[in-house]
Image: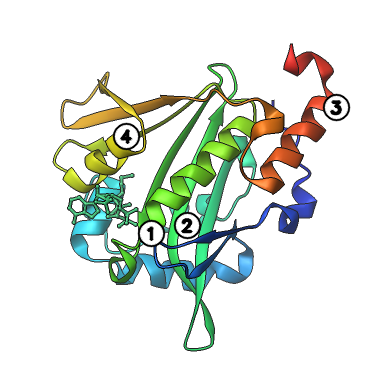
Amino acid sequence: MSTLRLEELKQYSDTLRTRHGEALNVRFVEPRDTEELQHYFRSLSTRSRYNRFFGAISELPEGLLHDFLQIGDRERFTIVATMMVDGFETIVAEARYALHPEAATLEFGLSVHDRWQGHGIATALMKNLECRAAALGAEHIFGETLRSNETMVSLARKSGFTFVNHPDDWKLVRFDKEIQVASKDIPCASWRLAALSRQAERPSASA
Ligand SMILES: CC(C)(COP(=O)(O)OP(=O)(O)OC[C@H]1O[C@@H](n2cnc3c(N)ncnc32)[C@H](O)[C@@H]1OP(=O)(O)O)[C@@H](O)C(=O)NCCC(=O)NCCS
């Protein structure tokens, strides 16, 4: 389903805005981010890490760190949102998503650093993820959160997701949204282009 040219990752960067208009660069994670990404997770609050990974961890275990850095492997992708802070490109949020081609769904999880929460960053990132889902041909986008995570539940509701019980774990809830946007109408320029080129390569995909 996905035919992105991963050797040209840089063309899939997006500039988003926080609620106050600050620029956020959203791009695929790169090997050079390894230390900074681990630093990001270590410096999240215990509560944010718990909510992100549904359990107590102090940093990304080595295997998971390795997985986070593999872009496109088994249709899984990691993106980071960065801002210039004191002259340094700093990771302020991350998201990981997986395309499930057989179900035409895109699953995601995300976090925003505590220092930057409440600035509309997750709202903007989730809209961007919807663009990515549409570009990859997904018909639904979904995520999972702890029922107790009121912030994520409220954010998902405001972003137009609906809730269903998790099939295996009563502590979790799944939020889901149908993607109903034609390739030419995808509201993120780079993802609109990706979708149109995918459609041109595989005309049957648009049928
Ligand atoms: C959940 C999370 C991603 C939200 O990120 P964020 O960038 O702060 O969210 P936004 O600023 O876009 O806020 C969007 C909405 O979330 C809700 N929200 C934000 N902060 C809230 C809080 N402290 N309490 C309740 N609701 C809150 C509000 O509905 C808000 O909309 P509003 O500002 O119009 O009222 C962030 O808190 C986080 O990273 N938490 C830890 C990891 C996590 O929980 N991940 C989700 C599971 S995968």
SS for dot 4: strand
Mark 3 to mark 1: distance in Å? 39 Å
Q: Mark 2 points at which residue?
A: 65
Q: Mark 1 points at which residue?
A: 60
Which dot, 3 or 4, sits closer to the camera?
3
Left or right of 92, for residue 4: right
Mark 2 to mark 4: distance in Å? 20 Å
Q: Mark 3 points at which residue?
A: 200
Tag 3: amino acid: Ala
Mark 2 to mark 3: distance in Å? 35 Å
Expressed as whole percent of the image width and height from the top left, the position of residue 196 reads 78, 32
- Number of the label disc, if any, that sits on residue 144: 4
Mark 1 to mark 4: distance in Å? 19 Å
Q: Are marks 2 and 4 in contact (CB under 8 Å)?
A: no
Q: Are marks 2 and 1 in contact (CB under 8 Å)?
A: yes
First reached walking from the N terminus: tag 3 or tag 4? 4
Q: Are marks 1 and 4 in contact (CB under 8 Å)?
A: no
Q: Residues within 10 Å of mark 3 (few under 14, many from 20)?
A: few
Taking depth in this image into account, of 133 and 37 the one nearest to the observer is 133
- Asked if the beta carbon under badge 4 is closer than 8 A to the nearest atom of ligand 1, the reply is yes
Tag 2: amino acid: Leu
Image quarter hosting the C terminus: top right
Residue at point 52% right, 49% down? 67
